[in-house]
């Protein structure tokens, strides 16, 4: 009777809360977590400053003798998205190498974070004595979204610092601060679309981290080119709502599939 009453007190929400405490404690003690956040902060600073220093430099093709003039960035917000109006200097590079890279970078965290559980035997022991597959998937997904959100924020801060150091313009070309804020909110919510993809591939790959990373990067690239269209610099409330709806659908749908994968496959 006592054991029955004790088990009845542990609800699904309670088990998720317990799993989240464990995963967030492990995440905050992980060197990988801080390395990725630091890279997200430093990358836009170095890229912006180096591109600005190379502005106007000329390279000559030794075979044809053709000269190419390097154009550096002219606006800080090129690191975040494409500004309305005429393309700015160096815009071709920043169209690919900008804040949207963080959607791919978080795949590394998710894959290594999950593969370590299976490699160490922690997952098998966890499912036996402490939590179910559903709670595990929910906890890992939320941890990945949280890490991805911090990486986006760190990249934004690094972009502002890099722009200030390089003396770039902060002109929004007719956009408002609200548009910029909504753009960042939309990108953070869009993490809920990418992270469930990485979680599903990671629980399928289990201890094979290399397979999880390759599969996650391949799967993420299918949606990567849409990020700039879904979360432009001129984002509105509609973009935020679309990202929130997409994140909810992917999180619930792929989360359910991840749970089935864990139940139907071996844990070793």
Image (cartoon, rainbow, N blue to C red):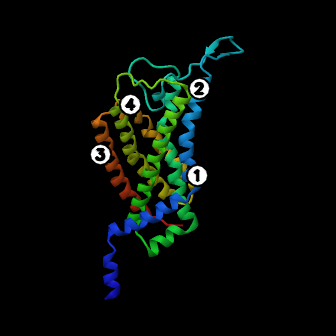
Q: How crowded is mark 1: few (under 14 residues within 10 Å), some or many (20 or more)?
A: some
Q: Which of marks 2 and 1 is in front?
A: 2
Location of residue 37 with respect to 167 vertically, above or below: below
The residue pinned by badge 4 equals: 233
Q: Are marks 3 and 4 in contact (CB under 8 Å)?
A: no
Residue 153 occupies quadrant:
top left
The residue pinned by badge 1 equals: 210
Residue 51, numbered circle: 2
Q: What element carries label 3?
A: helix
Q: What element carries label 4?
A: loop
The residue pinned by badge 3 equals: 245
Residue 199, numbered circle: none
Instruction: Report the quarter where the C terminus lies.
Output: bottom right
Q: Distance between the residues labelled 3 and 4?
A: 19 Å
Specify the farthest residue to the right: 62
Residue 58 visible at all: yes
């Amino acid at each position: 009777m006592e054991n029955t009453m004790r088990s009845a007190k542990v609800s699904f929400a309670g088990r998720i809360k317990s799993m989240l405490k464990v995963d967030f404690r492990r995440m905050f003690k992980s060197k990988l977590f801080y390395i990725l956040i630091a890279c997200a902060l430093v990358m836009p600073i170095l890229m912006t400053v180096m591109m600005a220093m190379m502005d106007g430099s000329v390279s000559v093709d030794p075979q044809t003798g053709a000269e190419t003039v390097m154009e550096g960035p002219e606006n800080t917000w090129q690191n975040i998205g494409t500004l309305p109006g005429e393309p700015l200097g160096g815009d071709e590079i920043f169209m690919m190498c900008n804040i949207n890279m963080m959607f791919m970078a978080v795949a590394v965290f998710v894959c290594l974070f999950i593969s370590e559980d299976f490699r160490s035997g922690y997952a098998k022991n966890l499912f036996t004595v402490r939590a179910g597959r559903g709670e595990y998937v929910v906890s890992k997904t939320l941890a990945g979204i949280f890490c991805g959100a911090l990486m986006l924020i760190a990249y934004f801060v690094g972009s502002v610092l890099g722009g200030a150091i390089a003396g770039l313009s902060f002109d929004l070309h007719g956009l408002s601060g609200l548009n910029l804020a909504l753009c960042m909110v939309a990108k953070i919510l869009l993490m809920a679309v990418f992270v469930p993809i990485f979680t599903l591939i990671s629980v399928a790959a289990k201890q094979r981290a290399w397979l999880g990373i390759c599969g996650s990067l391949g799967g993420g690239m299918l949606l990567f080119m849409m990020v700039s269209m879904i979360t432009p610099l001129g984002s509105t409330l509609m973009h935020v709502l679309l990202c929130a709806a997409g994140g909810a659908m992917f999180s619930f749908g792929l989360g359910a599939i991840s749970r089935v994968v864990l139940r139907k496959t071996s844990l070793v």
